[in-house]
Amino acid sequence: MEEVAFFRLTITNSLSSQVSQKTFSSAVTVGYIKMNLELITGVSAKTMQLQLLSEEGVLLCSLLDDSATLGSHPVQNACILHVGIDRPPVNLYHLTKLSGCGN
């Protein structure tokens, strides 16, 4: 049986300069991580692209398979988990003006 480890990761994202830290078990899946990061980043899990970077910011890998575990990637404490999106965010102001709301 493989030992479960815990990693404290720094979370960054493409939409804001906000940085946070979160601890994840090596046994959780990439899909589970994405669901947990929705509330922190405001990015939908469906459009999220995760990149694992070293503490120095060097790209280690992209987390592409939602069913893969965190421990199957070269993760270490203090790594950066960067949340990107595969399409640009919707401009909420533009939608408000088009719908006639808020005028």
Image: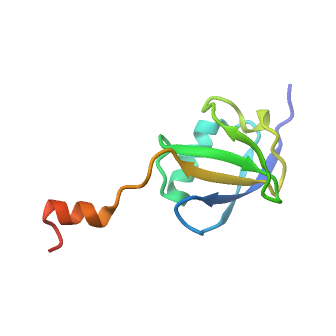
Quadrant showing the N terminus: top right
The quarter of the picture where residue 30 lies is top right
Please state the horizontal and vertical placement of residue 24, each as a whole percent of the image.
72, 48
Task: Please give the name of the residue rendered at 86% of the width and 29% of the height, measured from the top-left corner.
Answer: 2
**For residue 91, side relative to residue 41 (left or right):** left
Please state the horizontal and vertical placement of residue 13, each as a whole percent of the image.
59, 58
The quarter of the picture where residue 102 lies is bottom left
The quarter of the picture where residue 11 lies is bottom right
Camera-side residue of 78 and 61: 61
Scheme of colours in the image: rainbow
Please state the horizontal and vertical placement of residue 74, each as a whole percent of the image.
82, 40
Task: Please give the name of the residue rendered at 78% of the width and 37% of the height, measured from the top-left corner.
Answer: 73
In this view, 89 is above or below 50:
below
Residue extending farthest bottom = 103
Task: Please give the name of the residue rendered at 69% of the width and 40% of the height, measured from the top-left corner.
Answer: 62
Task: Please give the name of the residue rendered at 53% of the width and 45% of the height, measured from the top-left corner.
Answer: 48
Camera-side residue of 56 and 5: 56
Quadrant showing the C terminus: bottom left
Please state the horizontal and vertical placement of residue 29, each as a whole percent of the image.
65, 35
